[in-house]
Amino acid sequence: MRFSSPLFHYIIDYIYRIDYIYRIDYIYRIDYIYRGNSAFPFSLYYMFKILIVEDNLNLQKLYNAVLRSSGYTTLVASNGAEALEVLENNHADLMIVDVMMPIMDGYELTDLLRKGGSEMPILMITAKGEQADKRAGFLVGIDDYMTKPVDEEEMLLRIKALLRRSRIVSEHKLDVGGTTLHYDSLTVTANGEETTLPKKEFYLLYKLLSYPGQIFTKYQLLDEIWGLESESDNTLNVHVNRLRNRFENNADFEIVTVRGIGFKAIRKSDDGK
């Protein structure tokens, strides 16, 4: 017996999709815990936090599951106003945003962020596929555009490309003046000398130097670098002090304490900016 009804295929596709969400979320949780105990290498994308702004709860859960299964950390919001509140208290490396949302739509949110000086990569996902809608998105400052229904693999590829373009390197290497951080070997090369760092020290330095001049709270750094292993502020302070001692004579950067908030790395060539 053959089933050719479009409704039948829609129902089957829906069942598989829901099953996929729960299976991926489960796998992500197990993998996250396992990697937290150092059973797996630290994922390159684990440090990258993506904000999902989508009022459709099913799609929000789908994007969340797909991104987490690929090693990204996620934040969620149901409209532009909620997204602004989330960004007030959290750092995000990239934002996925829907257009049509209550209270504040994707166009208005993007426009506000760009006018406020944010250079965060923005991927707009919407049911609107007209050229005029795409043009409106690019005019307010989005970086890329996808039309629903979204192909998850294509979305991940576009995210990777946006992160690469925004100087959050996916080539496992970061250059800061004459200093180079090699992600695969956990080494820092400066003045012809190569230093191998302990894992957490390297991830901390890599995160700070990926965003020179940007302030990270202690909570953000503990959450992103230590994850489920998060300990006290003292753990972070010890690692920062070790990095300062190692690179006290480095001519390219230094780590600065922002009293009462956290830390930032500055490029010495940028006069502290």
Image (cartoon, rainbow, N blue to C red):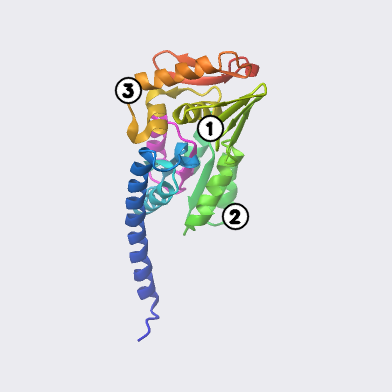
Q: Nearer the viewer, mark 1 or mark 2?
A: 1
* Depicted 136 relative to depicted 166: above or below: below
Q: Quadrant of residue 103?
A: top left
| Image location (x, y in percent) of residue 60 | 38, 49
Q: Which residues are magenta?
A: 80-106
Q: Looking at the image, which is closer to me, 216 or 182?
A: 182
Q: Nearer the viewer, mark 3 or mark 1?
A: 1
Circle 3: residue type: Ser
Of pointers 3 and 1, the one earlier in the residue sequence: 1
Q: Which mark is residue 186?
A: 1
Residue 255 seen: no
Q: Which residue is mark 2?
A: 131
Q: Which residue is mark 3?
A: 232
| Image location (x, y in percent) of residue 107 | 50, 42
Circle 2: residue type: Gln
Q: Secondary structure at mark 3?
A: loop
Residue 69 seen: yes
Q: Quadrant of residue 165?
A: top right
Mark 1 → mark 2, Cα distance in angstroms: 45 Å
Q: Looking at the image, which is closer to me, 168 or 86?
A: 168
| Image location (x, y in percent) of residue 52 | 42, 44
Q: Are marks 3 and 1 in contact (CB under 8 Å)?
A: no
Circle 1: residue type: Leu
Of pointers 1 and 2, the one earlier in the residue sequence: 2
* Depicted 75 relative to depicted 252: above or below: below
Q: Secondary structure at mark 2?
A: helix
Q: Nearer the viewer, mark 3 or mark 2?
A: 3
